[in-house]
């Protein structure tokens, strides 16, 4: 290998490592928002986050910019970034969008889902219910969101997957702000009933259950006092 080739190899390796670090940082911050460990309104200080994840402030800036495109972070000129705090009207709009998207998603799932995919959905729902029973709230929230995203994946449309992933994260912020005190997103048996309808091949019932499920989640929203979490190091030390 020539000197030039060795140099190019080192550059590519360094670039790959930097990309991996950036992606890992993005996933961890995104997950903390989805799981409601980072409350709406929490200040996201570039310097502190850079120290936590051992990356440069430019990496943190790119990650926060990406999250702002997903509407879960707000970039405020001259004041830095915070976890987004959607208004109640914006939260209701998120649920309206989800009903439109997930009606189509669930019908497609009934047409496309194979036995092994339905079995995987059942396993996910079982894990979700176990977390609910044991009080593992953070994992329960994550699995509840994953259920809806997995349905979108079964529908076979990556654009729907990406769009619904953003909507699920925005829903989590809405629940954190306006939901019940336990921060739950889904009823205990809702997902299980939806899977049973998919397995039975009943598209109308599956769609009806999904729309009812989302509407009930939306109906639980109410204006209440907002609480923010500021200790970023403590939050990410538990992740």
Image (cartoon, grey):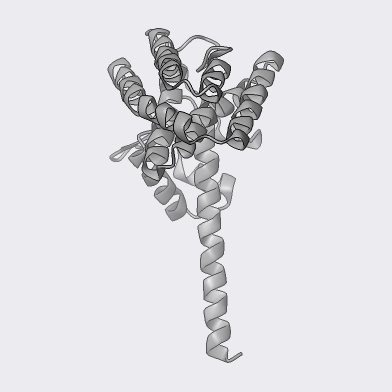
Image coordinates for residue 232, horizontal then vertical, percent: 55, 34
Pick the front one: 109 or 60: 109
> Does residue 181 lie above or below 34 as drawn?
above
Pick the front one: 169 or 40: 169
Indicate the quadrant where residue 104 lies: top left
Residue 150 visible from this viewpoint: yes
Pick the front one: 129 or 94: 129
Residue 54 relative to residue 177: left or right: right
Query: What's the residue at 50%, 53% (across, down)?
Result: 22
Image coordinates for residue 220, horizontal then vertical, percent: 42, 8
Pick the front one: 103 or 10: 103
Query: What's the residue at 55%, 30% (across, down)?
Result: 231
Image coordinates for residue 120, horizontal then vertical, percent: 62, 33
Residue 99 relative to residue 54: left or right: left
Query: What's the residue at 36%, 43% (across, down)?
Result: 159
Indicate the quadrant where residue 6 lies: bottom right
Query: What's the residue at 53%, 35% (across, down)?
Result: 31
Residue 77 relative to residue 191: left or right: left
Picture quarter with the N terminus: bottom right
Residue 230 visible from this viewpoint: no
Q: Which residue lies furthest to the right in this view?
A: 134
> Does residue 31 lie above or below 141 as drawn?
below
Image coordinates for residue 224, horizontal then vertical, percent: 41, 8
> Does residue 219 lie above or below 62 as drawn?
above
Picture quarter with the C terminus: top right
């Amino acid at each position: 290998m020539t000197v030039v080739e060795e140099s190019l190899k080192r550059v590519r390796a360094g670039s790959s490592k930097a990309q991996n670090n950036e992606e890992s940082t993005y996933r961890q911050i995104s997950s903390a928002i989805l799981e409601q460990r980072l409350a709406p309104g929490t200040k996201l200080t570039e310097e502190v986050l850079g120290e936590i994840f051992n990356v440069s402030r430019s990496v943190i800036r790119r990650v926060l910019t990406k999250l702002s495109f997903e509407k879960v972070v707000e970039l405020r000129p001259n004041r830095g970034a915070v976890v987004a705090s959607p208004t109640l009207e914006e939260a209701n709009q998120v649920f309206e969008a989800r009903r439109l998207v997930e009606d189509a998603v669930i019908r497609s799932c009934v047409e496309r889902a194979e036995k092994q995919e339905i079995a995987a959905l059942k396993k996910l729902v079982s894990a979700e219910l176990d977390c609910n029973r044991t009080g593992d709230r953070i994992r329960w929230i994550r699995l509840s969101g994953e259920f809806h995203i997995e349905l979108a994946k079964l529908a076979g449309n990556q654009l729907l997957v990406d769009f619904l992933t953003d909507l699920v994260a925005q829903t989590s912020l809405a629940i954190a702000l306006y939901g019940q005190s336990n921060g739950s997103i889904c009823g205990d048996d809702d997902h299980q009933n939806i899977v049973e309808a998919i397995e039975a091949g009943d598209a109308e019932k599956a769609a009806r259950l999904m729309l009812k499920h989302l509407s009930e989640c939306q109906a639980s929203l109410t204006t209440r006092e907002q609480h923010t979490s500021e200790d970023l190091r403590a939050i990410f030390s538990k992740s």
